[in-house]
Image: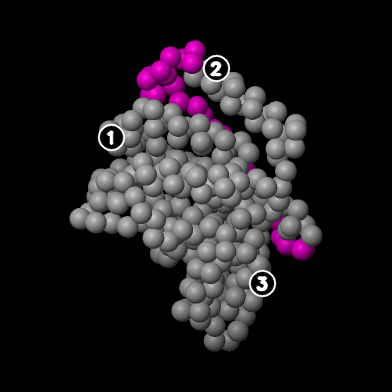
Amino acid sequence: MSANKPVAAFFDLDKTIIATSSAFAFGKEFLNNGMITRQEAWELYLTKAQYMLVGQSSEKMDSTRDALAQMVAGWDVEDIQRITRDTLREVVAPAIYAEARELIDDHRRAGHHVIIISASAAILVEPIADELGVDTVVATEMAVENGKLTGEITRYLKGDAKAEAVRQFAAEHDFDLDHSYAYSDSATDIPMLELVGNPVAVNPDRALKKHALANGWQARTFKNPEPLFQMPNAREVGIGAGVIAGVTALAVAGVLIARAMGGGKDDKRSA
């Protein structure tokens, strides 16, 4: 470590700190508060199912981003903040990896600056950061007019854009990147991981695992909690249990067939 420059620890969020996706975690609560329709809730659950089972390609991440941005257009920022704050302990806190909490605490004790950097919207990331006692969030930003989201994404932190955000943030705060750390589960974050002297693959997808092995990067497995995915019940979504069972079976079968035919190749990603 340089005698004058501070060290940073950059953490991706989804599947790295939490065993789910922050973009989907509050879906049920938004449904309960009338902010999304039952059909939109069902589509969120299916997208989450795919994400949790096989991750998302870069193209799928972009299409999900666009769909979510359209969905939230017109939402009141204060309503979002109230819902996420009031339900965080029930919805997201149980999904935080205990190993991630301990690692964040270890970095703090070492005097490192902890930063959560995420492709998810800052308005969803910030309450999770508060729960973890992390003061700094660098995340996707959305335009706000008259206290409401417009649906326009003004800054999307994925891939090279996330790496550039780390480079810019490090320059502004004079961090020593050669001695800094970065953690992620996704191959889309390889550009970010390559910027630091201590890149760590956490629960890596197939492509990141291969890259980490080839480059001698450290890999870690977080298991507590188990990243379980639960499908919604019929009452929550408003359609029959038989339909849910059928659609779920088809979705899972499709995933298994895709894997068998090579769909699980190295182009699978997560946010």
- Label 1 amino acid? Asn
| Residue at x 62%, y 70% (from the top left corner) | 195
Considering the numbered disc 3 on the image, is that residue within a helix, a strand or a loop? loop
Residue 166 drawn above or below residue 225: below
Q: Is residue 111 visible?
A: no
Residue 236 drawn above or below residue 81: above
Local crowd size for mark 1, using a 10 Å CA cut-off: few (<14), some (14–19), many (≥20): few
> Is residue 80 found left or right of 253 in the rendered image?
left
Magenta stretch: includes residue 151 = no
Q: Which of marks 3 and 1 is nearer the N terminus?
A: 1
Provide residue 63's location: percent of width, then percent of height: 50, 45
Residue 193 drawn above or below residue 66: below
Q: Which residue bears the numbered disc 3?
A: 197
Mark nearest the camera among 2 and 1 is 2
Q: Residue 34 lies in what quarter of the image? A: top left
Q: Residue 249 lies in what quarter of the image? A: top right
Q: Which residue bears the numbered disc 2?
A: 246
| Residue at x 22%, y 54% (from the top left corner) | 147
Q: Residue 51 lies in what quarter of the image? A: top right
Q: Between 39 and 103, which is closer to the camera in this rendering?
A: 39
- Label 3 amino acid? Gly
Q: Which residue bears the numbered disc 1?
A: 33
